[in-house]
Amino acid sequence: METRVALFQQKAIRKTFHDGEWWFVIADVVAALTDSANPQGYLKDMRRRDPLLTQAFKGGGQIAPPLSLEVSTAGGPQKALCWNTEGLFRLIQSIPSPKAEPFKLWLARVGYERVQEIEDPELATQRTRALYKAKGYSDAWIEKRMRGIANHDELAQQWKTRGVREQPEYAILTAEIYKAAFGLTPGE
């Protein structure tokens, strides 16, 4: 169990790593975005007002339902209701609080940008370059990384054209390339 704490406006939001992704304690998020003294009660009221949120909690649609996961607490490890990032975004959409509005605006902007990228895929490449630049990577590094991504995509397409379909086959081929190029497998 790996529990970490993220701070949002000086409020602790616990998260735990589960099945390769971060899951956030729902009560912590509700408390941070509403200042509610009773986040569980607030969440219960939200679910009563929003039947689609209730459905999402049960695994309705394509969103994974929340899970009861073990997280660190002052009194030792305890189970808490947690949701992954996608579920958390759905939850935030239902919170009628001024503190949730910046997140809702951000989600709207990201959604709009994604629609733009679907219409013009070159925008995705431009955004990727801008993100790497903002993280402080050099132009030479960015160019090398972008070429590496393009080469990987081309190789994966060639494998697909030649009948490679399953993930284990991709892993075996990748390991062979690493071994031939570097003398080591990816795991090593």
Image (cartoon, helix red, strand yellow):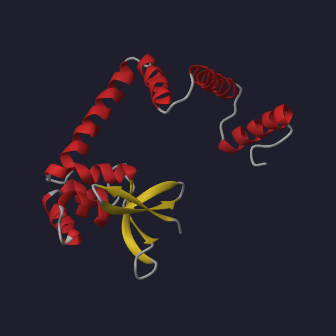
- In this rendering, would 180 be left or right of 57? right
Q: Is residue 67 above or below residue 84?
A: below
Residue visible at 53% across and 58% down in the picture? 19
In-front residue for pair 165/24: 24
- In this rendering, would 2 be left or right of 35? right
The outermost residue toward the bottom is 75
Q: Residue 6, position in %: x, y?
A: 39, 57
Q: Is residue 122 above or below residue 32?
A: above
Residue visible at 71% across and 26% down in the picture? 162
The quadrant where residue 168 appears: top right
Residue visible at 50% across and 60% down in the picture? 17
Q: Residue 34, position in %: x, y?
A: 18, 60
In-front residue for pair 103/8: 8
Q: Residue 181, position in %: x, y?
A: 83, 31
Residue visible at 28% across and 50% down in the picture? 90
- In this rendering, would 84 be left or right of 181? left
The quadrant where residue 157 appears: top right
Give the number of marks: 0
Q: Is residue 134 above or below residue 83?
A: above
The quadrant where residue 149 appears: top right
Q: Residue 86, position in %: x, y?
A: 37, 49
Q: Is residue 154 above or below residue 66?
A: above
